[in-house]
Image (cartoon, rainbow, N blue to C red):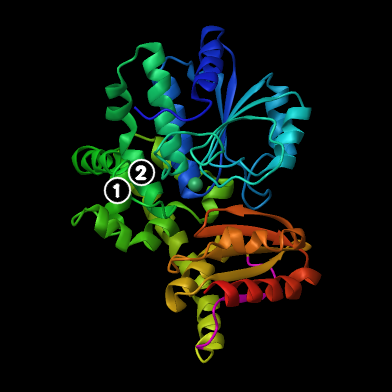
Amino acid sequence: MVKLKNNNKAVNRLVFALKNSEKIAIWSDYDPDGVFALVLAYEALVLANFKKNNIKLILPNQQKYKRSFNKFNLSLLKNMGIKLILGIDFGTTDFEQIAMAKKMGFEIILLDHHRQRSGKLPALLVNPWQKGDNSKSKNWSGTGVAYLFFQNLYKYLKINIKKLEDNSIDLLLIPTITDYIKIDKRNLPYLKKSLKKIKKCPRPGIKNSLINLDLYKKLSIKNLIKNRWKLGDFFGTLEGNGNRNNILRLLLSRDNKKTKLDVKNIKKEMMLFEKCTNKFANQGIKKFVTKSKNKFIFWGINKEIDFPGAIAKISNKLNDYFKIPVFFYCKEKNIIKGSVRDNYSKNTNIITAMKNCESLFIDFGGHPKSAGFYTKNKNLSAIQKSLKKFYEKNI
Ligand SMILES: [Mn+2]
């Protein structure tokens, strides 16, 4: 069993909450990994005899708030008398937001897999990438980190971990793929079990989604990876994730008929999203196709794009087309929001590239192949210059 740093402390705190019938919150990110992790954590806690009424799920509205903690939802939790928040798939570099929550009196456990940056984080962090974590297993999605954590909680509570596997392991594979997690000999056995469960008897939300996306017949890890964009679009970047929690409901439901209807509606939104992101991606392709000497693309548009998640998608599409690092941005309110993808270069790392001009960003974070940033309009050209220097030296 894989045990990550701070695992025992976090398990003890949750067991304390369980024994005292304490109300707790699980807070996650709205991308596919976040939603899958939220469902996994909720089911794992309920199976471990936490009362459903004592668990409040928070998936912030992505049209209104950035990822991580926000004041609105925190106040809501405070008014409910909740003190402990289990945050999943975010937090490692959210120094300000975590400090705000801490100041409001919350205790915070984070199960995350984003890369660390220096700074003070007033939370109990479980993250395979954090300094001092001696586990050899590093390549996990947020859902994967949560799964490992709950295995340990079950062991402590003397609950058979098979129970967790039978109920929820079907949730593991898809976010591993949509989050571009490297598959290795340590996570592969888990992913194979997840695939087997998806083949045999997954929750109806997963089965009906894969049928609708035409991925259920030829089901294999390889084929799912090949169709990664379909999974990402369907489970992630849709409007309904923001204000209707449609993916959350889809995954939690055990009702075959209802999920079929939900899948149909989500698919409709997915097609609209595709249309919007294709439009901008094609603009980018036209713009850069003649510039074959470019070592990276730094490009954006000076307006807002209505679809949440669209910039990540556009960045992805351009990266898939040109196979060089892509920094795509657009306006969000008064600042610039960017999404970075680099799935093809072997020797460079987008986090390192951005660290090189750290002071020009309001914030940035993520993984070596997939990340995001916020900055000011006036800093864009300086960032581009710094990146140019970086990539000329390193590629
Ligand atoms: Mn993630």
Q: Is residue 133 above or below residue 304?
A: above
Magenta-highlighted residues: 292-305
User: In this image, 393 relative to 247: left or right?
Assistant: right
Q: Amino acid at mark 2?
A: Thr
Amino acid type, residue under disc 1 in the picture: Asn
- Residue that mark 2 sits on: 259
Image-quadrant location for residue 88: top right
Q: Residues within 10 Å of mark 1 (few under 14, many from 20)?
A: many
Can I make out residue 308 in this image?
no
Callout 1 secondary element: helix
Quadrant location of the N terminus in the rendered image: top left
Q: Are marks 2 and 1 in contact (CB under 8 Å)?
A: yes
The main secondary structure of the magenta stretch is: loop
Residue 346 percent location from the top left of the image: 43, 66
Q: Secondary structure at mark 2?
A: helix
Q: Kindly identify which numbered label has been placed on residue 208.
A: 1
In this rendering, is residue 148 above or below 156? below
**Label 2 or label 1, whichever comes before in sequence order:** 1
